[in-house]
Image (cartoon, rainbow, N blue to C red):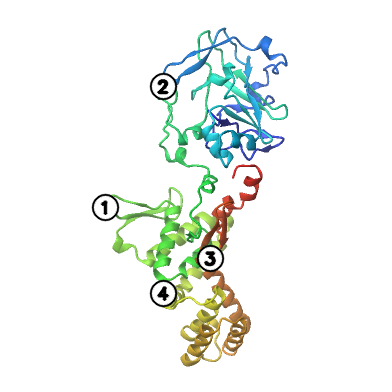
Amino acid sequence: RAYACGLKLHGRTSLISARPLARYPTRSTTLADAGLAEAKAPPEDTESVEAKVVVRGAGAKGMGAFADERLQVGTWVGMYVGTLTTPEETMQRYNCTNILSASLRAEYLLWVGGGLSIDAQNSSHFSRYLNHDEQGNLDVAVDSENVRVDFFAARDIEVGEELTFDYGVRYWLYRPKPSPESDSRNFSSPAIQEREPELSLLHPPPLGTVLPLIPLSAVELQAALALPELESRDALLRCLEYFGAKRTQDDALEVSFGVGVEADRQVLSREQLSHATLQRAATACIVAGVLNPADTSGALSHAFESWVAAMDGELGLIRRWRSRVPRFKSARHDAAVLASYLLWKNPGPHGVTKPLPKECCNTMIGEVHGSGDELVLDSLIARLALHAPKEHVMELVAMLEQWIILGDGCTVVSIRPPALAGAVPQHLRFVWERVPRLVAYGLL
């Protein structure tokens, strides 16, 4: 029955306030909150004034705590009684290497903030036996400054009623679900089954695992469109899956061309899922879901859609080139070689003033292949500048290098603590860059 109250502690939300391996009381509050504004502050002499409660069998739930007197709404019932403990002591007691695993093993651990918790494992107080109910008759108040947790009557309670409170949906993610009599929620609902992203850090992918690009921004979509042909298709499918694409029973794909209820949704067979169709759908999703909210004038979206249309032919050249040509020493080497190919094959968009012969292009590529020296790259860029404006050549190489780096995804380089290297996208940075703080708080 380990649980954590997601309350504001000293003006901020505790890092351990939303641990999905623990209880998350729905009606938890602080003493100053409006729900308990009229309630008396918990007295210091708790033994003389706490509610009369009896502990006895509660059927399939095991033991439970029952009111032995009538309690009016707002009445202070009692406090959570146990041993004050630190995360290190908790991990040692339950033989775990992180506090999340320990909270799953602990039966009566309650987090109170400031790196402290109350463990009622060896307590004989009735608070140890408070069971779960979605419509529980108790409110929970956490006082992190005085390191205590108090229970108040959420409504009038009659003699003989079991005292309960809502553990919250997070508690049940890794445990047998509560009985229908005590909880009406559908715990198989995707909204409930969605777990805290930090859980992925408890069991990260094996060392060396490459996490592929999921294009969720304009520049990431550009990088996806510049991948080798098959990799580009896979990246676009990952993008569309993020925006709600799903397989149908006949193995077709239901694709959304945009976001929201007004977006055009089409069911497409395998034969209809051309790269052009996937590109059009992904572009519509990025425009509607990312660019439009960022710029309500529509100028940004229009510029991006125009760029995709204008670059369609060149992006096709890039995909075919990268599908056939092995990788060079670094992303910058790949970008410089690819730039020379584009200036020869597609000179129009690059302001080529002096045609680059195929033989000259092949010679440049051979030199880069034969030597990984940075001086060779500098020489190649200088020679390309004889055929197109130097500033444009350098911008082209930089753009291609960025796309190649993004397209390579990121790699798991450490398990303890978890760490990624490479182009870590925003949706992964949100979780993985919190590792140092989570380690400092003893959560990893």
Quarter residue 44 falls in: top right
Seen at 67% across and 12% down, the residue is: 47
Which label lies toward us, 1 or 3? 3
Residue at the disc numbered 1: 250
Give the percent coordinates (x, y) of residue 265.
Answer: 37, 53
The Cα atoms of the two marked residues, 2 and 1, are separated by 39 Å
Q: Earlier in the sequence, mark 3 or mark 4?
A: 4
Question: Is there a contact, CB below 8 Å, between mark 1 and mark 3?
Answer: no
- The amino acid on which the numbered mark 3 sits, given as a three-letter code, is Leu
Q: How many marks?
A: 4
- The amino acid on which the numbered mark 4 sits, given as a three-letter code, is Ser
The Cα atoms of the two marked residues, 1 and 3, are separated by 34 Å
SS label for mark 1: loop
For residue 181, the mark is 2
Give the percent coordinates (x, y) of residue 188.
Answer: 40, 36
Q: Earlier in the sequence, mark 2 or mark 1?
A: 2
Seen at 49% across and 25% down, the residue is: 134
Residue at the disc numbered 4: 323
Residue at the disc numbered 3: 406
Q: Earlier in the sequence, mark 3 or mark 2?
A: 2
